[in-house]
Image: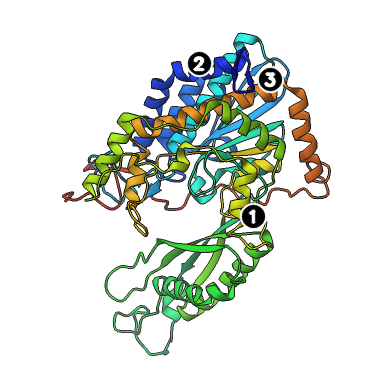
Amino acid sequence: MATLGEKLITDEKQMIMDWVDKNQSKLSNWNQKIWNYGETAWREYKSSKWYIKQLQKEGFTVEEASGGMPTAFCATWQNGDGPVIAGYAEYDAVPGNCQAADTVERPRNGLSKYAGGHTDPHSALGIGSFGGFLAAKAVMEKFDIKGKLKFFGEPAEKVRGSKPIHAAKGYYDDLDAAISFHPFYMLPLCNTTRWNTHCAVAYSVMYTFTCDEPETWLSSGDDSPIPASHASVRAPGATDAVVQMYTLSKMSREHMLPHNLGWSVNETILNAGQATADNIPGQMAQIYYFIRVPDIKMAEDVVKVLDQNAESAAKSAHCNWKKEWITKSRAGLENHTMATVTYENLEIAGPPKFERDAIKVAQEIQENLGLEPMEEPYLDEVENLIPPEEAEKKIRETIPGIQRHFTSDDYTEYCWHAPTVRLYIGRPALKSPKPGYAYPAWVMNALGGIRECIDPMIESASKTIGMTIIDLLTKPEVLKQAQNEFRERTGGGIKGSEWQEPLCDYEPPIHYRWPEYVTTARGKDQWVIPAEGDK
């Protein structure tokens, strides 16, 4: 055994850290693989296939396409009877964020800048978690620690896709505890764990408008033998319906929820028109809404307004309309025991530290942006720890007292099936050179793909997660305390008086025209918006 200050580092935990150090280059290479795939929501074919093959090599049994989702998976490895500990990888990127791992703004080679790219980055999220589970597996084998590891592939997190479906289909029902890791994306949630204020509710809906009977628009009853005459007045059609829906919903946004809460509604036009030439109206168009709100009642209120707007838009454009659910995700549930034990292991692992090569990269970015390079270019917060209760106090300074949840992520689905921790590790982010200066978005995206800059976060996450798994498997009193807290907060555990059942009552929304890479006569992995020079 070794010591860190007053903390005792067991042989098992030392082996976790040694395993991560020994396998650092492997983890780095794996992250590069997923980062460069840059596949977007519901279309992560290469990324999920890579994980499945790697998990099988590591001795896991893998259910592919779990929950009816082609790019999801559920992998298990077991060493006798013992607690079931869950974690997961995410691997979806974001359309329109294709950035090379470079110190200048440019897309990855051969791709449009509008193609997919990792922003958070989910590539490192997945490998950081995966490394922790593999390290824990090695320790379980070495010391014959009993238990079961359950590692999920969770696609489409950016649209809160897979976790509500996995939850509703029973994949989390046998869990004893779960570990959720995410690279930091806002202060003070950096190198810490969430305490009370967990992520909020997310709903998203697709509205489809169809102009099915354009010939009945303002029918004059004349004697024309051509019902859809090119000379007749044209029905507005589906494109007009989407425009009306977009405009109405923008106008009514301030009438959806109170002004003093943190919430948002964003929209994307997924399909537009399908109109041909001449006088034929657009036959079908779709608009997709994503809603982040503090609680379920508020989400339902927003959707009620959107439904009214859809009805009005359809009537004005001579269309029919339908609403289909993309996601219904619950708000999170705190577990102080899990937050504490995980943070204690983060203290042992330590936060990321950016060494000479990472500093040189940051200085080169600053110089390329016309800035004076800094001796210490990285935010202080990404290299320092903040205790969970201190982070909680800081985050509550910006939130109304009546608002219990804030921001959005569907890890919250795990919270209602087992004691769950939300862990944040600092990712590379640069100091502002002067008050009010904001770096272009491509800078953080690029840093997520540059080895010297992102690898320290992966190492810290893997060590923290691995050691937390070992604690949960070897300290029954800790797991019991976490589960007792879970039962208390849910009024008796699953099906308890305060428990929230899964909201998902829809099938996986995989058949829409989500952005994706395609193979064409021009080559492989073409994006719908061509790269510059692609004729």
Q: Earlier in the sequence, mark 2 or mark 3?
A: 2
Q: Position of residue 172 (x, y in %)?
A: 67, 36
How dense is the environment of label 3, judged by Cα within 10 Å: few (below 14), some, or many (20 and up)?
A: many
- Residue type at mark 1 is His
Residue at the image position 29 percent from the left and 84 percent from the top? 231
Q: CA distance from mark 1 to mark 3?
A: 33 Å
User: In the image, is residue 135 above or below residue 329?
Assistant: above
Q: Amino acid at mark 2?
A: Asp
Q: Which residue is mark 2?
A: 18
Q: Is residue 256 above or below residue 38?
A: below
Residue 123, percent across and down?
43, 36
| Foreground residue among 328 and 183 | 183
User: Between 122 and 524, which is closer to the camera in this rendering?
Assistant: 122
**Cα distance in 3D space between marks 2 and 1:** 37 Å
Residue on which the image places disc 1: 405
Q: Residue at x 78, y 32 (%)?
A: 481
The kind of residue tagged 3 is: Gly
Give residue 147's mark.
3
Q: Nearer the viewer, mark 2 or mark 3?
A: 2
**Mark 2 against mark 1, which lies toward the viewer?**
2
Mark 2 or 1 closer to N-term? 2
| Marks 2 and 3 close (CB-CB < 8 Å) | no
